[in-house]
């Protein structure tokens, strides 16, 4: 039997050739794990992927079992079983991505002195609310992309403000805002104001059927980038006026992620890209659905 070993989205993971540091942004605690030949591959995989598949035999190895116990006991991650044909859990996609070099730091004392670890945020993914239940019928599809969490809860804007108080203004390169219909968040204006103080780039993520033409005017001065997620299977099932998405004024600021699962969907994707001159920045993302 295999299991998912994952790092919580609120945990920052730094690595060098000799040590691995897990920093819990919720309570400010740190866990330092020496890197050696027995645990190197596991720690490096965790640093890159946040969630990895491990076999029972791998998990039973004493060295790796000790690491798993440390991660669990410090609330930095956990292990859950992999069900048959299950996809990688969406909730374990990295919400905080650290891209900067840990080698630049000389000591660990800076964590307890002034929370300088928060200055090493490069890119942040924040889910501010959940998606509609009836729009999440194809769970396998959405478990594999930055999209929606299945929840009706909204993020507390006050708690979010407290989190970002520890970040120097304009220290973060890019903040990605995701959710269901993010425009419905009661305190969206407050959230955007906080983000604008802390980041150089604000990137809004919408699924194509959540995007409305009137959002363009509302968001015109509030976002630097716009990402539209377009699962081709949903586009084919539910005819949609794509003209509302592709606009010359926003073409250079908009990126489209087209999700495909088979050759038929790939051909439809090619048609969309070929017939819409305003689609300048785009990516085709093939997804595994268990039968392809």
Image (cartoon, rainbow, N blue to C red):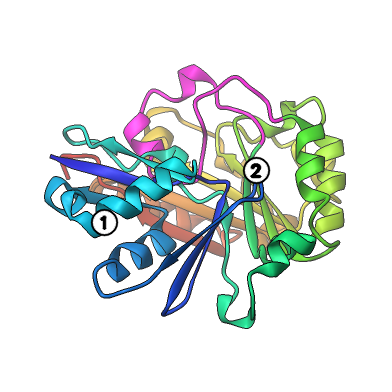
The answer to whether residue 10 is above or below residue 174 is: above
Residue in the picture at 29% in, 40% down? 87
Crowding near the residue tagged with mark 2, few <14, some 14–19, many ≥20 C-alpha atoms within 10 Å? few
Q: Which residue is mark 2?
A: 26
Residue in the picture at 41% in, 33% down? 234
Describe the element under mark 2 as helix, strand or loop.
Answer: loop
Describe the element under mark 1 as helix, strand or loop.
Answer: helix
Q: Which residues are magenta?
A: 128-155
Position of 118 with respect to 51 (left or right) is: right
Residue 138: which quarter of the image?
top left
- For the residues labelled 1 and 2, the Cα–Cα distance comes to 25 Å
Q: Main secondary structure of the magenta part?
A: loop
| Front residue of 220 and 184 | 184
Q: Which residue is mark 1?
A: 64
Q: Position of residue 1 (x, y in %)?
A: 12, 39
| Front residue of 135 and 79 | 79
Q: Position of residue 3 (x, y in %)?
A: 23, 42
Residue in the picture at 49% in, 18% down? 133
Position of 167 with respect to 265 (left or right) is: right
Q: Position of residue 285 (x, y in %)?
A: 38, 55
Residue in the picture at 39% in, 52% down? 269
Position of 202 with respect to 95 (left or right) is: right
């Amino acid at each position: 039997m295999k299991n998912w070993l994952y790092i919580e989205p609120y945990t920052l993971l730094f690595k060098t050739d000799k040590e691995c540091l897990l920093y819990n942004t919720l309570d400010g605690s740190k866990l330092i794990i020496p890197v050696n030949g027995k645990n190197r591959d596991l720690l490096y995989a965790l640093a890159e992927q946040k969630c990895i598949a491990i076999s029972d035999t791998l998990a039973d190895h004493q060295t790796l079992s000790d690491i798993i116990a440390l991660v669990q006991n410090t609330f930095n991650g956990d292990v859950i079983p992999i069900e048959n044909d299950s996809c990688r859990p969406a909730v374990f996609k990295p919400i905080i991505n650290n891209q900067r070099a840990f080698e630049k730091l000389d000591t660990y004392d800076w964590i307890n002195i002034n929370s300088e670890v928060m200055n090493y945020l490069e890119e942040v993914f924040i889910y501010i609310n959940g998606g509609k239940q009836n729009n999440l019928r194809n769970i396998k599809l959405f478990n594999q992309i930055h999209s929606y969490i299945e929840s009706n809860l909204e993020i507390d804007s006050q708690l979010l403000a407290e989190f970002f108080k520890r970040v120097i203004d304009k220290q973060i390169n890019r903040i990605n805002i995701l959710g269901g219909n993010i425009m419905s968040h009661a305190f969206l204006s407050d959230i955007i104001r906080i983000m604008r103080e802390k980041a150089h780039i604000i990137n809004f993520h919408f699924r194509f059927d959540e995007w409305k033409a009137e959002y363009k005017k509302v968001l015109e001065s509030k976002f630097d980038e716009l990402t539209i997620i377009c699962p081709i299977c949903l586009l084919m099932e539910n005819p949609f006026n794509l003209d509302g998405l592709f606009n010359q004024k926003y073409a250079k600021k908009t990126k489209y992620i087209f999700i495909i699962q088979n050759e038929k969907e790939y051909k439809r994707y090619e048609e969309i890209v070929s017939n819409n001159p305003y689609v300048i920045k785009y990516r085709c993302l093939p997804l595994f659905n268990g039968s392809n």
